[in-house]
Amino acid sequence: MSSPRATPPRVPPADRGATRIADRVVAKIAAQAAREALTGADPGAAPPHATVTVHHDIARVRVSLELGYPADLGAQCAAVRHQVVHRIEECADMSVPEVDIDIEHLHSSYTRSAAGRDRRLR
């Protein structure tokens, strides 16, 4: 006579493994959050780009922006920082101790019209 097999104990889902979110995924979240923070920004500006380094659920973020000028650059950067931190904490459950912002280019209505004239003349 054979003995019945013992059923292994059930392991709760949270204890079965780990979830890792790739740095590039967190970077996409950060770039989208920066776009959300810059609603009404210069339509000629390139979309924000983000790079992220994740280590033990801590994300360090660098966002590159093109902004309109004249404008309150400090307020725009603060809005981007706030939105990026909020979105990464909400979507990826990671802490974000710092968000570095690089303003790559400033756009103004004068430079846009001058650049347009310059292109037509060549």
Image: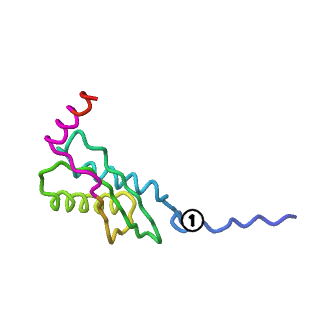
Q: Tell me the residue at 32%/55% (across/down).
A: 64
Residue 79 percent location from the top left of the image = 20, 58
In this rendering, position of residue 73 left or right of residue 1: left
Residue range corresponding to the magenta coloring: 103-117
**Three-letter code, disc 1:** Gly
Say left or right for 51 vs 83. right
Residue closest to the far front? 122
Residue beneath disc 1: 17
63 and 90: which one is in front? Answer: 63
Q: Nearer the viewer, residue 102 or 115?
A: 115
Query: Does residue 12 appear to the left or right of 109 in the view shown?
Result: right
Image: 44 above or below 36: above
Q: Who's the residue at 33% across and 72% down the image?
A: 97
Tell me the quarter of the picture where residue 110 sits. top left
SS of the residue at dot 1?
loop
Foreground: 103 or 49? 103
Where is residue 47, by image quadrant? Answer: top left
Magenta stretch, overall SS: helix
Q: Position of residue 94 (x, y in %)?
A: 39, 66
Could you say which quadrant of the image residue 109 lies in? top left
Mark 1 neighbour density, 10 Å: few (under 14) some (14–19) many (20 or more): few
Q: Nearer the viewer, residue 100 or 24?
A: 100
Q: Residue at x 22, y 37 (%)?
A: 115
> Is 107 within the magenta?
yes
User: Magenta segment: does it hold 58?
Assistant: no
Residue 75 location, x and y as percent?
Answer: 15, 60
